[in-house]
Amino acid sequence: MPLSALRRVRWAVRATLTLGVAASVAANVLHALPNPISQAIAAWPPLALLLTVELISRVPMHRRLLAAARLGATAGIAAIAAWVSYWHMAGVAARYGESTSSAYLLPLSVDGLIVVGSVSLVELAGRIRGIEEAQRATTAQVAEAPAPAPVVAPAPAPAPAAPAKKVAAAKKAPAKTAPRQRRPAAETAALAEAIEAAHPDISRSELARQLGISVSRLASVRRELQRTG
């Protein structure tokens, strides 16, 4: 999946997670005593979980011990938020006319939505971060690559005069050119993403021209990455 599509999906997942947290906060506030302090205390656990998931998805970790500690703390916060929100939502549902079974099942839908949204957001953040790092590495390699030095070939010795018939046959025969080696599709896609990031308004034909390929080849590369991604 292209980087732009992954970013759009991440915003959709973030909105879904925010909706689940908002439902949990609303149930906690309705269950609390009618005063600002009680309502703020009741609303805090799901908000803390939302902030924790955002931190995990945005801040990369490079040490396993710290990553394990962060995941453990996140699991603890999620367990506290799930426990508190479950009983608060069950009480609110029962108070507003839901049957006993419905009152105990409804909170599971909210908690499940929050869990799925949190895991999806962290997974998408990792994939986006990996693609961005690959693009930066490719751009740096292209920028640092030295220009090839011109090669001056020695003047060829004069060839003996060929007969007129052979010269005419050589002119009629089509010239053969060595086939150009095609750049791998992954490298072409990475270069295209880097150029589009630097020039967001670039047209498809201009992008293909800078890559040294045709527009149809560019479309074929992107279709191939979509199938493999």
Image (tube, rainbow, N blue to C red):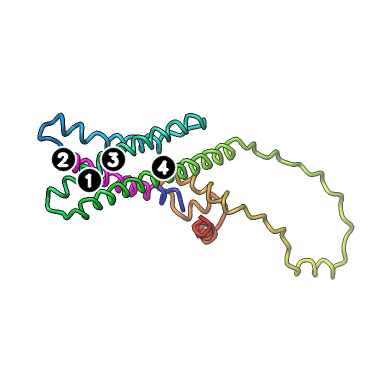
Classify mark 1: residues with Cα within 10 Å, few (<14), some (14-19) or many (20+). some
| Residue 220 sits inside the magenta stretch | no
| Mark 1 and mark 3: Cα distance apart in space | 15 Å
Report if the CB atoms under discs 1 and 4 are less than 8 Å apart.
no
Q: Which residues lie in the magenta part?
A: 7-28
Report if the CB atoms under discs 2 and 1 are less than 8 Å apart.
no
**Of the residues shown, which amino acid type is indicated by label 4?**
Val
- For the stretch drawn in magenta, the main secondary structure is helix
| Mark 3 and mark 4: Cα distance apart in space | 22 Å
From what the image shows, is residue 27 above or below residue 1? above
| Mark 4 and mark 2: Cα distance apart in space | 31 Å
Mark sitting on residue 31: 2
**Of the residues shown, which amino acid type is indicated by label 2?**
His
Taking depth in this image into account, of 44 and 140 the one nearest to the observer is: 44
Q: Secondary structure at mark 2?
A: helix
Q: Sequence order check: which comes first, mark 2 or mark 1?
A: 1
Taking depth in this image into account, of 17 and 2 the one nearest to the observer is: 17
Count of numbered circles on the image: 4
Quarter assignment of residue 86: top left
Q: Sequence order check: which comes first, mark 1 or mark 3?
A: 1
From what the image shows, is residue 219 above or below residue 39? below
- Residue that badge 1 annotates: 23
Left or right of residue 155: residue 89 = left
- Residue that badge 4 annotates: 122
Q: Secondary structure at mark 3?
A: helix
Residue 210, percent from left and from top: 53, 49
- Residue that badge 3 annotates: 83
